[in-house]
Image (cartoon, helix red, strand yellow):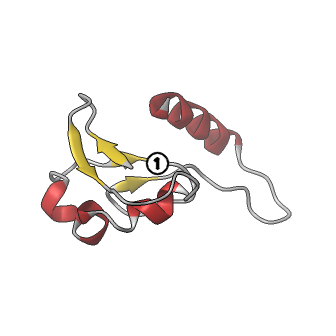
Amino acid sequence: LIVLLHNLLVMDYGLGHPGSIHDVWAFQGTRIASNPMQLIPHNHWMWVDSAYPSEMWCVVPFKKPKGGRLSRDQNVYNKYLSKVRT
């Protein structure tokens, strides 16, 4: 797992996990997961998928509520978030 800044510089990485492990499990073994404020500057954040924790420094997409729907604004947000992450 490699965590990159917006300018594609490596911010953190995790080694030793098999390729079949989900990114969120590999992420838990990184320095950034255990001490994000030390590595992520103030007013900065990471764009991640919905498996990651929702934190001030970790921007996740909205999840559809069980038996419900996302609002139009939430769907638009998720659409643009997915474009940022690709």
Query: Would residue 9 be seen by someone viewing this image from the given angle?
Result: yes
59 sits left or right of 75 in the view: left
| Image point (15%, 51%), residue name | 41
Q: Residue furthest right?
A: 67
Tag count: 1
| Image point (27%, 71%), residue name | 34
| Image point (26%, 61%), residue name | 32
Q: Which residue is mark 1?
A: 48
Amino acid of disc 1:
Val
54 sits left or right of 6 in the view: right
Q: Nearer the viewer, residue 61 or 5?
A: 5
Q: Nearer the viewer, residue 51 or 79?
A: 51
Measured as percent of width and height from the top left, residue 17 is found at 44, 60
The correct choice, above or below, for 9 with respect to 18 in the image is: above
Measured as percent of width and height from the top left, residue 79 is found at 61, 33
Judging from the image, what secondary structure is the residue with disc 1 in?
Answer: loop
Which quarter of the picture shows residue 28? bottom left
Which quarter of the picture shows residue 20? bottom right
Measured as percent of width and height from the top left, residue 54 is found at 46, 63
Q: Nearer the viewer, residue 79 or 23?
A: 23
Q: Residue furthest bottom?
A: 34
Query: Would residue 54 be seen by someone viewing this image from the given angle?
Result: no
53 sits left or right of 66 in the view: left
Assess disc 1: are there few (<14), some (14-19) or many (≥20) residues with their C-alpha within 10 Å of its C-alpha: some
| Image point (32%, 46%), residue name | 3
52 sits left or right of 67 in the view: left
Measured as percent of width and height from the top left, residue 52 is found at 49, 60
